[in-house]
Amino acid sequence: MDILPALTQGRLCVALIHPAIGHAWLMQPLAALAQGGPLNVIDGGNHFNAYRLAKAIRAQGFDPTPILKRVYISRSFTCHQLTACLLLVTSQCFPLIVFDILSSFQDENVSLHERKGLFSTCLSRLRQITRAGPVLVTVKTNHTEFIDSLLANCDQILEMQFQPQPVPLLLF
Amino acid sequence: MGRTIPSITLAFLEEQDSLKRFRRALRKADQQVLDDLLVSARQHIAASGYAAYPLPLETFLLAMLLEEHKEIMRLRAIVESFADKE
């Protein structure tokens, strides 16, 4: 799936990812994005693997070290941290990729009322920052809570379908 | 809080996993040689972790070379000691 054309200013893109696929496929487009300038990632589900990104950059024929220096990662482990990360986004933080935004909102240690409040803050912040630059949000399809309100507020939905690969015949 | 990159052991296991099909296609004897090479890379995993190089496979390959060169030096010393006796 080519996400680069979808990342245009003023649009909130949501990529729906089947849990069996993971985020590895996103590394090729991220490598292409990072070559163009700074790239900001908010990792909500601890899915960002810098080694895979380095491999993707090398596969495109570039030295990963200078390009990786342009990639800024913020990791959040709770919904409060994720909300804080989004609130701290400045006008220099684009393009912005938010990995697995709903992951930390599945935390049952935080009351539903509080999670709803935080998620609505996140949504309004996302709508606000999307006016300043391209934003891509990824969501795992098994995180069903809050997904409807996120999809209702986004401008474009990209869906990454799971296609099980045929099992190769084993000769020995 | 949290790590910026996965641990080097995880990176090593991932690289090892990516070689699974290659290993499977090798002859049994060659599979054992490949396993030995991976063991030698694992001996220097702490150094690979400390290097924090973006492409860890390259440090693993270097660790394999290091062990191979150590072996060559050891064998060379043995050969030279035999040559001195003669």
Image (spheres, coloured by chain):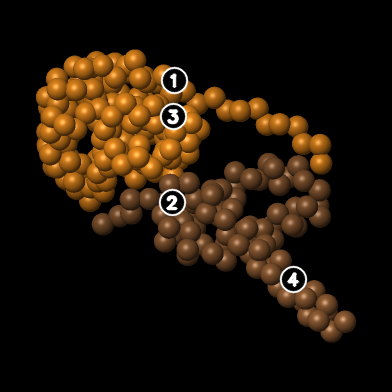
Q: Secondary structure at mark 4?
A: helix
Pointers 4 and 2 within a single chain = yes
Place of residue A138 in the rendered image (x, y in percent of width and height, measured from the top left): 33, 30
Label 4: which residue?
A: B76
Say which residue appears at 75% left-offset and 32% top-offset: A169
Between circles 3 and 2, the one closer to the viewer is: 2
Place of residue A26 in the rendered image (x, y in percent of width and height, measured from the top left): 41, 30
Q: Chain of mark 3?
A: A
Q: Chain of mark 1?
A: A
Quarter that holds the C terminus of chain B: bottom right
Q: Whole-Å distance between the Cαs marked 4 and 3?
A: 46 Å
Asked whether the residues under the numbered discs 4 and 2 touch, taking CB atoms below 8 Å apart as contact, a structural biologist would say: no
Between circles 4 and 2, the one closer to the viewer is: 4
Q: Amino acid at mark 2?
A: Tyr
Determine crowd level at label 1: few under 14, some 14-19, many 20+ residues with C-alpha closer than 10 A.
few
Query: Would you identify the image quadrant in which residue A119 lies?
Result: top left
Residue A170: tell me if it is visible: yes
Label number found at residue A28? 3
Chain B tint as drawn: brown
Determine crowd level at label 2: few under 14, some 14-19, many 20+ residues with C-alpha closer than 10 A.
some
Total tally of numbered discs in the picture: 4
Asked whether the residues under the numbered discs 1 and 2 touch, taking CB atoms below 8 Å apart as contact, a structural biologist would say: no
Asked whether the residues under the numbered discs 4 and 3 touch, taking CB atoms below 8 Å apart as contact, a structural biologist would say: no
Relative to B78, does residue A21 appear above or below in the rendering?
Answer: above
Chain A tint as drawn: orange
Label 2: which residue?
A: B53
Q: Whole-Å distance between the Cαs marked 1 and 3?
A: 10 Å
Q: Secondary structure at mark 2?
A: loop
Q: Say which of A70 and A87 sits in front.
A: A70
Q: Amino acid at mark 3?
A: Gln
Label 1: which residue?
A: A1
